[in-house]
Amino acid sequence: MLVNADFHVHSCFSMASSKDMLIKNMAPKSKLKGLKLLGTGDAFHPGWLDIIEETTTYSGDGIYSVEDMDFVLTTEVEAKHRIHHLIIIPDIDIARELSDKLPSRNKAIDGRPKTNLDGAQLLDLVKDYDCLIGPAHAFTPWTGMYKSYDSIYDCYDKKPDFVELGLSADTFMADCVSELKDFPFLTNSDAHSPWPHRLGREFNQIELMDISYSSIKHAIQHRDIKANYGLIPNLGKYHMTACTKCYKLIDPVFAKENKMRCSCGGTIKKGVDFRISEIADYNEPRHPGFRPKYVHLMPLAEIISTILDKGVTTKTVQGRWQKLIDSFGSEIDVLINVPLEDIENVDLEIAPAIDAFRNKSVDVIPGGGGKYGQISFDKVLKKPEKPKVITLDNF
């Protein structure tokens, strides 16, 4: 069976996460999104595990279910060098035992525990319990694995199970790095709130024999990811090299020459785009035969918000979003599968923007330095010319 899955989210116990990030909220919102399988996030936090046990039904083989939504235990761990690792866990008993064994001072406080273990030590620890592990948002400049290592094997000593690309990278960028040719790529949301424009903003279409941990493990290890769906990388807030204070996009060579300091006094952060160019072996991606398609998406509410020039959580935007969901069932179907003429019959103003994504005809003002990029539908909707991007030329 083909399943839409998002393996990387956080609970209400993680820093900077919404207090509404609870199973009772995540389940119905995920269904509206069009997901069938969701990671729990934060599965080394004792309090979160208690909530999972109290609010779900154990379906067996590592799956916890509520309201026809299935969850698998996952967590993100911040290890040595502030590198983040994503772990998929067989069941709650193993999660509790690993939590007890993980050397960490904050695991009972923060849903994302910190440990002094390095990647190799963490891999060895969780592999003793049949977990799956790989680098989370592997290329991001603050906590991605490639910020500290030029090779994934330098981090783990041996081969992990997958590579999570992160919001600022995609298959076309990652497949310029030759050592990744044997890895399945995961695209996950890293959501900190249960809004559908956060949950599943990146997701995987994965072939499973059934909904079970064993099947998830088999699919990842046998590279049965059938499609990756995610943001246009330029929209990622760390895609381009930029100042973390004023968000100017700055030429990376110029930034190095100026010791990563901006003229405004802020710190310049190396972008994912430039970091990949430093470790790339090819100028163009070389996709291995098993590599699935990568489809660029943008959350439907954010498309509506951009078109209407109103906040994504306003009643106006949410009302237009809900009308489309009521008409067609799920956001993913609206974005990918529903015929355009059917969307036009429900919302003639939004349909051209959805069509622009499907036809890859949108413009993006790239993000960097911690600021998300911006989409422009000017050509599609014939609006005034978009604002000029700040670059090195007008630094």
Image: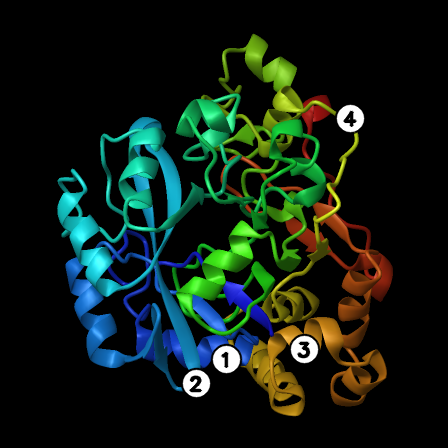
Closer to us: 237 or 385:
237
Looking at the image, is mark 1 or mark 2 nearer the viewer? 2
* Mark before the other along the chain sequence, 2 or 3: 2
Mark 1 near mark 2, Cβ–Cβ under 8 Å?
A: yes
User: What kind of element bears circle 4?
Assistant: loop
Q: CA distance from mark 4 to mark 1?
A: 40 Å
Which amino acid, mark 3?
Answer: Asp
Residue at mark 4: 283
Dot 4 or dot 1: first in sequence order is 1
Which residue carries the number 2 mark?
68
Q: Earlier in the sequence, mark 3 or mark 4?
A: 4
Q: Is residue 203 above or below residue 263?
A: below
Sort mark 2 into few (<14), some (14-19) or many (20+) by Cα contacts within 10 Å: few
Residue beneath disc 1: 31
Q: CA distance from mark 3 to mark 4?
A: 34 Å
Q: Quadrant of the C terminus?
A: top right
Which of the pair 12/115 is nearer the observer?
115
Q: Give percent across and percent down for residue 342.
A: 80, 87
Q: Position of residue 370 (x, y in %)?
A: 49, 40
Q: Left or right? Give the position of 390 relative to 49.
A: right
Residue 53: x and y in percent read: 21, 74
Residue 113 seen in the figure: yes
Q: Residue at x 73, y 45 (%)?
A: 387
- Does the residue at mark 3 contact the one at mark 1 (Cβ under 8 Å)? no
The relative height of residue 251 versus residue 18 in the rendered view (above or below) is: above
Answer with left or right where residue 231 lies relative to residue 15: right
**Marks 2/3: CA distance?**
18 Å
Residue position marked by numbered label 3 in the rendering: 333
